[in-house]
Amino acid sequence: MPSPMTVPYASPDAGSYLGGARGAPGGKRRSLPQSRGVKISYTPAAVAAFLAIMGLTFLPTLGSKGALLFLTAGLILGLTRPGEMLAMLRQEWLIMAMALWCLFSFLWSDYPAISLRHGIQLVLTVVIFIAICFRVAPLTFVKIILLSHFLVGLGSLASGRTRADGGGFLGLFGSKNALAAASAILIIVALAVTIDRRLNWYWRLLALLGLVLGSVLLVMGKSAGALVGVIGVILAFGLIVVLQRLAPIVRLVAITLGLVLMMAAGVLLSSMSDELSQAFLDATGKDMTLTGRTDLWMIAFREIAERPLLGAGFQAVWVPGNPLAEQMWMQFGIKSRGGFNFHNSLISNAVEIGLIGAAMQAVIFFTALVSTLSWAIRSPSAASIFFALFMVRQTMSMLIEVAFFTQFSIDSGITVAAVFYAHRYRRATGAVETRRPRAEPRPRDPRLALPIPDS
């Protein structure tokens, strides 16, 4: 019997959940015609999941049509097995409670109609991604992310769109930061698929091409934040590879020493913060407050203090006509009066949904971070490594942007998937440990009350 450190991903219907056995949640598996050793199998559920994720990936180009495609394909997945879907939603009760909290914030929102509309959209986004994760295996989900982001990357490269001021490449997206975020996901998923030798050669070739394409687009986008994030992800990947090879007790010691060294490095670098900040900002062209983030955070803390528990309402701050938003748009020269936020996920979300909602999001997010890292270290695969690296990237992004949870967002959807699959892995490994038979005690010599030797 395999040791708990090498147990494969499993579930109550382990073979079917992995997508390789009969009775899989996705339905009957079909195959495209075989040509020169290439055989691509699929299920109706996988096709629906692909269409839903494609709708979100191409949302900047398709607009409402992309949202409609996402909703239609996603709801078909959820409604075909309503009883099982309800069980899944109950199982993921915390993330559903968070989404419903955002929805019901319209009751105290400054702009009830906006909070209600966006809240409904967020609930649908969460429900659809739970449906996708329930119906397709983790590896299938990762392949869909790879293919969809490769296609949007090709489309972006072919479009040739750049900013009018020459400040970066846009592709199919509305901003260079959006392009950089999609390119970073492509790099992460391509890296995870490329190194998994168990996958077919054509998937690994596509991943290798995606790695090159994502890197080219990331450089063309000229987004310093995304570039730093990808570098951090690569370092995290190296750390995961090293930890995989260590015994559990050695791994625990290594992680402890690593945390101590990180804290020591933080103390050391804090004494050089002015010099390091100036060097980084000179290289990126930012100002000393990183586009005024410290000023924004001071305003955000003031707003949180005024309404600490409930907040102003889900997405009810950056609304045209809101005096606070109008003041900050004018102060920071945002002529479009949109695409602006408090540049920190927890701070921004606390302003909107209060400390209660932000606390639920923090518990969900950081639990998923720890769970996916544990999954990648204990059972490395394309899926586990992708979700672990994605959560590392989200952790770095949350410090300077709003990384979660927003409606019709592919980043938020993948975060939901990371939560779902990490929970399934943790429950599966726990079930394996529970079912493992205990070693029978050796017979004892009643005269000595000591174990009888084996020989």
Image (spheres, rainbow, N blue to C red):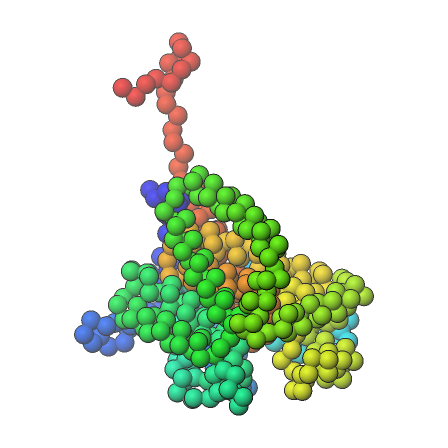
Residue at figure coordinates x 43%, y 61% from the top left: 234
Where, by quadrant of the figure, is residue 144 drawn? bottom left
* x, y percent for residue 434: 45, 42
Where, by quadrant of the figure, is residue 315 drawn? bottom right
Q: Give the number of callouts.
A: 0
> Nearest the camera: 31 or 283?
283
Q: Residue furthest bottom?
A: 164
Q: Residue furthest left?
A: 36
* x, y percent for residue 151: 39, 80
> Nearest the camera: 356 or 167?
167
Quarter of the picture holding the C terminus: top left
Residue at figure coordinates x 18%, y 74% from the top left: 36
Examine the rendered structure and indicate whether residue 148 appears above or below residue 422.
Answer: below
Where, by quadrant of the figure, is residue 206 drawn? bottom left
151 relative position to 370: left or right: left
Q: Is residue 80 visible?
A: no
> Nearest the camera: 232 or 128?
232
Q: Residue furthest right?
A: 306
Quarter of the picture holding the N terminus: top left
Residue at figure coordinates x 55%, y 63% from the top left: 396
Q: Residue furthest front?
A: 275
95 relative position to 187: left or right: right
Examine the rendered structure and indicate whether residue 57 appears above or below residue 195.
Answer: below
* x, y percent for residue 291: 64, 74
* x, y percent for residue 197: 29, 60
Residue at figure coordinates x 27%, y 66% from the top left: 200
Examine the rendered structure and indicate whether residue 25 appears above or below residue 11.
Answer: below
Q: Is residue 233 visible?
A: yes
